[in-house]
Image (cartoon, helix red, strand yellow):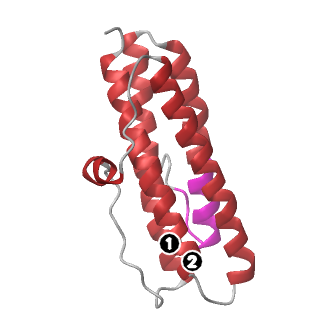
Amino acid sequence: MKYPKTKEVLNQLVADLTQMHMIVHQHHWYMRGERFLKLHPYLDKVMDELADQQDLVAERLITLDGSPVSTLSDIAKMTKIKDEEPNWNETIDERYAKIIAGYRQLEQDYQKGLEVSDAEGDYSTNDMFTTCHSEVEKRIWMMSAEINQAPEIDPE
């Protein structure tokens, strides 16, 4: 195998992106409050972006002769993103803070992918990781701003 560590990171990302999509979907369903009409459709866009990244990452793994994790039980075992119990009583800010925490895990996954794919010389995957990493950082910034927080991507 030419890129064994890169394939591991790609598969970790498939699991974490799948879990993250479910977390966002859950908060999308259970959201209530004064900003609901604005933020409910926003989370549709977030889920679309996560699904696009999941497909991109899985297809890259397949391109490298890998096999993406594809069962719910395997995803549950593999993901690093904490499962959430449904709750009607969380504020929108609390929901966003939990979503941001999941995005921070994705940011770490992509950062590891950048390092590993560079070390293994898989520059095509590295390019994909760079694009997705930037998208995740931007999402952290935007969601953090919505709840009046700094993104803390590179704090001083």
Image: 88 above or below 55: below
Which residue in the protein does label 2 denote?
29
Residue 136, x across and y down, in percent: 56, 46
Residue 79, x across and y down, in percent: 32, 50
Q: Residue at x 72, y 70 (%)?
A: 41
**In the visual, does 60 lie left or right of 111?**
right
Q: Quadrant of the N terminus?
A: top left
Please report the bounds of the magenta region as a residue range.
138-151
Q: Main secondary structure of the magenta part?
A: helix
Asked if residue 16 lies in the magenta stretch, the reply is: no
Q: Nearer the viewer, residue 67 or 24?
A: 67
Q: Residue 53 sits in which quadrant?
A: top right
Mark 2 and mark 1 residues within 8 Å of each other at the beta carbon: yes
Q: Residues within 10 Å of mark 2 (few under 14, many from 20)?
A: few
The label number, if any, that marks residue 65 in the structure image:
none
Query: From this viewpoint, is residue 51 visible?
Result: yes
Q: Amino acid at mark 2?
A: Trp
